[in-house]
Image (cartoon, grey):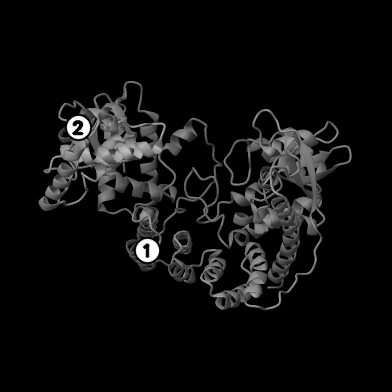
């Protein structure tokens, strides 16, 4: 199918059009059997359009939204946007006189333009002119209801507005002024403006109208991209997701993003059947519906919102698929619905959703919701069952913290965990810097010296060394892993069988840690792959000097321990590593340092990494920073100081408990 650009541009076809046509050719080659009649027709018709029309459509598709002012579509290679849009309109792909809602109008118009459009409102209500744009919209929206507003309702609104305005007209002029320094005064003025605005709005309003009906004096036009949903579907089939835009081509051409070239077969693609595309889009629509739920009601437990949640869950469950990847997306969506219910204190709804959700963490959330619902017996039974076979180190850690609390609430004796090696913890008092700097940087500068330099690395260094050593397994051209040239990671990176599918490749990389060959491999990839997108490598932090120093001081045995834990749970273990690393090059040794400023506490993933390092003899410590002028805990009461000290002690104990729980999980997995 011909999709190449014709040489009708004086200086050649623009880069974005060539890239879009390259994507269409790619889709025609790989997805011909999944495209329907409309999509085939689009590919044919697009190739036959005038060059300016093709360029205009792609320009609009690359921008956010589907509504555009013609005055904002001026490009030298396109010329007059209305002339270029005419062939698109003839095909029904673009609407040159779309109806605009009030929200659409506000999104397309500057504040100055809105004051011109609503000049009558400005005259009737002087306070209207002083309102911020969001408040102007709120003041007007109630009088421009979307949907089929009947005449009776229009008359009622107008009558109410007229009645309120009669009292308003006799008000002092000062009462209309908006005091921007006082929010209460602004709200009061906003309410009065809304009353006055109601008088100036015609009872014959409609929910949507062309721009010329909103603003008779305008010389501008608005274009709406009607074909956008079909093009979004094509974009989904090309990228395998909807978060990547057509601009990926441009960013790659400009060198902003560079990608590894994976030699995958033409048969490798994101979707194997059209139904999978439909399922993805259906799940995406449900996710958008979830995002709109907070707009339904500001009150938790409102009947309207509860009904919407029930309908949303039912819609998600009705989506039929046997595709494991799409089942994972469904599980993640259900988990987010459960989280929404928790935030809204809707405990029964949250329980019902978590009960049918297979996303990691759903079982723990069920226990927490049961606890919040004061159903302690059920919570304890489920937590005990989960503790016998935890799904991850994270769940084991949370259950170890939760079970003693449930035992106390049930009046049962608590079972004390076996003591584990504590994490070393110290404190340093430093002068607060004049410039605002992260506390980690201040600690780094304090500790660093010529003989023992300190680097701020957090998650970057260990992840990067792993990514550089294991570059080949990560970017292996396995079926379903890669299917377009703009992937920074394999599609199955977080799949349960990610490691298993590449086990021999990872084993070969880890064997280099035993043979000593790992150093050359890491340095070679550091040079050859520089700048290429990777889910593990932080190019902005890496320098040849840092990598060389790390390889000199980090034992291969410790690298292997870190890499093995990363590979066990990539999603959970890529973060939580200590902030700083200090090297002693002359002694070829190092130490990891987690920095905590005043009021900071260790996060769960940090506690798990600290516990793992302590258990395996990896040098690590926690450093608490206090500011000299404040004292160790100045500015707080004695009770608060004691509480802070107790919290630090609890963190140390929790890290020890986490070590036991993590080791138990590892042993259980190894045994199975």
Graded by Cα atoms within 10 Å as few (under 14), some (14 to 19) or many (20 or more), the crowding at tag 1 reads many
Whole-Å distance between the Cαs marked 2 and 1?
A: 42 Å
Residue 276 image offset from top left, x and y in percent: 39, 60
Residue 498 image offset from top left, x and y in percent: 59, 59
Residue closer to the observer: 39 or 383? 383
What residue do we see at 17% from left, 37% from top? 210
The residue labelled by disc 2 is 124
The residue labelled by disc 1 is 309
Residue closer to the observer: 66 or 601? 601
Looking at the rendered structure, the number of numbered marks drawn on it comes to: 2
Residue 465 image offset from top left, x and y in percent: 70, 45
What residue do we see at 40% from left, 44% from top? 26
Secondary structure at badge 1 equals helix
> Which corner quadrant of the image does residue 671 belong to?
bottom right
Residue 331 image offset from top left, x and y in percent: 47, 63
Q: Furthest-right residue in view?
A: 587
What residue do we see at 15% from left, 29% from top? 216
Graded by Cα atoms within 10 Å as few (under 14), some (14 to 19) or many (20 or more), the crowding at tag 2 reads some
Residue 351 appears in the picture as rendered: yes
> Which corner quadrant of the image does residue 528 belong to?
top right
> In the rendered image, which quarter contains the C terminus?
bottom right
User: Seen in the image, is 154 located left or right of residue 655?
Assistant: left
Residue 62 appears in the picture as rendered: no
What residue do we see at 55% from left, 77% from top? 378
Indicate which label's residue lies in the foreground, 2 or 1: 2
Residue closer to the observer: 629 or 518? 629
């Amino acid at each position: 199918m011909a999709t190449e650009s014709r040489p009708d541009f004086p200086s050649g076809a623009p880069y974005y059009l060539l890239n879009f046509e390259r994507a269409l050719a790619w889709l025609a080659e790989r997805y011909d059997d999944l495209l329907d009649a409309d999509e085939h027709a689009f590919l044919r018709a697009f190739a036959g359009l005038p060059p300016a029309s093709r360029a205009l459509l792609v320009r609009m598709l690359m921008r956010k939204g589907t509504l555009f002012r013609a005055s904002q579509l001026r490009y030298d290679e396109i010329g007059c946007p209305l002339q270029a849009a005419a062939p698109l309109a003839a095909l029904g792909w673009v609407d040159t006189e779309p109806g605009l809602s009030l929200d659409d109008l506000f999104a397309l118009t500057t504040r100055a333009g809105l004051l011109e459009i609503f000049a009558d409102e400005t005259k009737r209500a002087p306070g209207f002119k002083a309102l911020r744009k969001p408040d102007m919209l709120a003041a007007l929206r109630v009088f421009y209801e979307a949907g089929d507003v009947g005449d009776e309702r229009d008359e009622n609104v107008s009558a109410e507005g007229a009645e309120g305005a009669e009292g308003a007209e006799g008000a002092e002029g000062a009462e209309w002024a908006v005091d921007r320094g006082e929010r209460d005064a602004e709200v009061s003025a906003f309410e009065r403006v809304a009353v006055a605005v109601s008088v100036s709005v015609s009872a014959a309003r409609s929910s949507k109208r062309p721009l010329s009906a909103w603003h008779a004096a305008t010389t501008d036009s608005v274009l709406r991209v009607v074909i956008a949903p079909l093009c979004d579907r094509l974009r989904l089939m090309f990228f395998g997701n909807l978060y990547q835009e057509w601009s990926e081509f441009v960013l790659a051409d400009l060198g902003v993003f560079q990608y590894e070239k994976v030699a995958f077969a033409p048969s490798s693609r994101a979707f194997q059947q059209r139904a999978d595309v439909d399922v993805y889009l259906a799940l995406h629509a449900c996710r958008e519906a979830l995002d709109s739920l907070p707009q339904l009601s500001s009150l938790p437990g409102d009947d309207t919102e509860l009904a919407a949640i029930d309908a949303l869950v039912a819609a998600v469950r009705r989506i039929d698929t046997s595709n494991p990847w799409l089942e994972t997306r469904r599980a993640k969506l259900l988990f987010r619905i459960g989280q929404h219910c928790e935030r809204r204190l809707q405990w029964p709804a949250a329980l019902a959703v978590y009960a049918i959700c297979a996303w990691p963490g759903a079982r723990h959330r069920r226990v927490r919701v049961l606890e919040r619902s004061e159903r302690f017996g059920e919570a304890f039974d489920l937590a005990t069952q989960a503790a016998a076979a935890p799904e991850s180190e994270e769940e084991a850690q949370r259950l170890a913290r939760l079970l003693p609390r449930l035992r106390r609430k049930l009046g049962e004796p608590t079972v004390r965990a076996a003591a584990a090696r504590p994490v070393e913890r110290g404190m340093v008092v430093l002068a607060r810097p004049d410039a605002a700097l992260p506390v980690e940087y201040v600690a780094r500068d304090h500790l660093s010296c010529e003989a023992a330099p300190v680097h701020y690395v957090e998650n970057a260094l260990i992840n990067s060394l792993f990514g550089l050593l294991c570059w080949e397994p990560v970017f292996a051209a396995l079926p379903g892993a890669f299917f377009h040239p703009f992937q920074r990671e394999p599609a199955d990176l977080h799949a349960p069988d990610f490691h298993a599918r590449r086990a021999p490749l990872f084993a070969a990389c880890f064997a280099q840690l035993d043979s000593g060959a790992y150093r050359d491999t890491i340095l070679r990839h550091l040079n050859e792959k520089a700048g290429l997108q990777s889910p593990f490598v932080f190019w902005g932090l890496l320098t040849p000097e840092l990598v060389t120093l790390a390889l000199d001081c980090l034992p291969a045995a410790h690298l292997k321990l870190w890499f093995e834990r990363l590979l066990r749970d990539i999603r959970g273990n890529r973060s939580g590593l200590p902030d700083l690393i200090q090297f002693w090059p002359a002694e070829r040794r190092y130490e990891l340092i987690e920095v905590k400023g005043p009021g900071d506490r260790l996060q769960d993933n940090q506690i798990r990494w600290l516990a793992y390092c302590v258990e395996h003899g990896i040098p690590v410590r926690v450093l608490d920073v206090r500011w000299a002028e404040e004292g160790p805990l100045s500015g707080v009461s004695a009770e608060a100081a004691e509480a802070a000290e107790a919290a630090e002690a609890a963190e140390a104990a929790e890290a020890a408990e986490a070590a036991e729980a993590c080791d138990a999980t590892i042993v259980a997995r190894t045994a199975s």
